[in-house]
Amino acid sequence: MTNPTLRTVTLGCKVNQYETEYVRQGLLETGYRMAGEEEAADLCIVNTCTVTNEGDSKSRQAVRRLSRNNPASRIIVMGCYATRAPEEVASLPGVVEVVTDKRELPDLLGRFGVIDVPTGISTFGDRHRAYVKVQDGCLLRCSYCIIPYVRPGLESRPVPEIIDEVERLIGNGYREIVLTGIHLGHYGVDWNIKRPRQEWVRLADLVRQIAELDGDFRIRLSSIEATEVTRPLLGVMAEYSQKVCPHLHVCLQSGSDAVLRRMKRRWCTKRFLDRCELARELLDAPALTTDVIVGFPGETDTEFSETCATVRRAAFSKIHMFPFSARRGTPAATLPDQLPKRTKQERGRELARIEVELRDAYFCSLRGRRLRVLLESEVSGAPDRMVGTACRYAPVEVPRVDGVSAGQFADVIGGDTVDGRIRINDE
């Protein structure tokens, strides 16, 4: 009798990708094997996203496609869309179970025969970097965001559990560990409110303990809020600069104070820019990346111009730009003065032009600097060259070196910027 087959589909964020991997590894331990590309799966796991209406739609499409291509499969649906609309999800074809709370995942594995339910993961598929979820939940109430409604309670993982997981991943060859969470900067907050201040555990403390582990690896932080770019965190990043990437993804969302107030964000642009300057003061040429929403309800031409000016002052090396999408169930969806699609597209194109200008300026500033690159793949059409990601979150193309393969580090000196990447020429 052959082992039952498994297929997984993940939509959305790094936390979702981690949680899918956690379930996948647990099921493989019970005897499941991953289905081949053209092979029907006996069990399908779909991890859904609900951050936008499009996320809901793509989640439904994924379930329907799996049911159509795997007609005898049992489909289990988890994730934020499953939490927000469980009855809607349960009505989709092939769905036999809807997991509405991520805290139920160990119980799910137990029902499939996992006796020793794992506390974490040991591999991360065929990727060269591994995501490690350290925290869940968000208490903020940004007016455009649905996530606090589907992941409301803060929950930080114990430090020893995270350390054990990171050690396993390093031992299995992963050279970059990406710390992630729904609100990463609130790591430890749920414990600290019950402890005297001298016993508080913060993100900086966790990063320090991981950085002190033996091994040739590096740590990268995923998205963080500006108010959580603190001196203690930056101090740890500077002290362990060989282990912690000098890169911060700091969420801006808008560079207009008026729009930030309508978004119910927690700071003004001056405070945001002050934190960016602090990072540059304490770290060596850090990469600063961000998220920006264009076309928020009521955003005027002047307010958009303020965003462009703030983006330039922050000198981001990458901008994840999102046109505003009215998310049902959030206050922003009912705000007056919803902007037309054409306006959002025009502003998106303008912001994209600014991003290219800022990116190239930052990459040029890295010329002559030592960069540690995690090699990831061959350059398409050029097998004698490889591409990877530098510690400062820049794509870098290097000549292939005998004996050096994907998943390993290469230390290079920054060169010319060509087509959006740093290109290192042959000696």
Image (cartoon, rainbow, N blue to C red):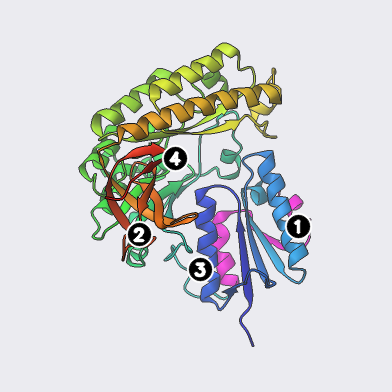
Marks 3/4 in contact by CB < 8 Å: the verdict is no
User: x%, y% of residue 291?
Assistant: 50, 33
User: x%, y% of residue 339?
Assistant: 68, 21
Give the residue displayed 69% in from the left and 21% down from the top.
338
- Report the mark closest to the observer, 3 or 1: 1
Taking 189 as reference, is 294 left or right? right
Of labels 4 and 1, earlier in sequence is 1
| Mark 3: few/some/many CA within 10 Å (<14, 14-19, 20+) | many
Dot 1: element: helix
Dot 2: element: helix
Q: In which quarter of the image is residue 318?
A: top left
Say which mark, if any, is on residue 166: 2
| Mark 1: few/some/many CA within 10 Å (<14, 14-19, 20+) | some
Say which mark, if any, is on residue 143: none
Marks 3/1 in contact by CB < 8 Å: the verdict is no
Taking 170 as reference, is 8 left or right? right
Q: Name the residue under label 3.
A: 25
Q: Name the residue under label 4.
A: 223
- Separation of residues labelled 1 and 2 (CA atoms): 36 Å
| Mark 2: few/some/many CA within 10 Å (<14, 14-19, 20+) | many
**Residue at the extreme front of the image, as rendered:** 427
- Separation of residues labelled 4 and 1 (CA atoms): 32 Å
Q: Name the residue under label 1.
A: 64
In this picture, which residue range is highlighted in magenta? 85-112
Marks 4/1 in contact by CB < 8 Å: the verdict is no
Give the residue displayed 39% in from the left and 20% down from the top.
313
- Separation of residues labelled 3 and 4 (CA atoms): 26 Å
- Separation of residues labelled 4 and 2 (CA atoms): 19 Å
Dot 3: element: helix
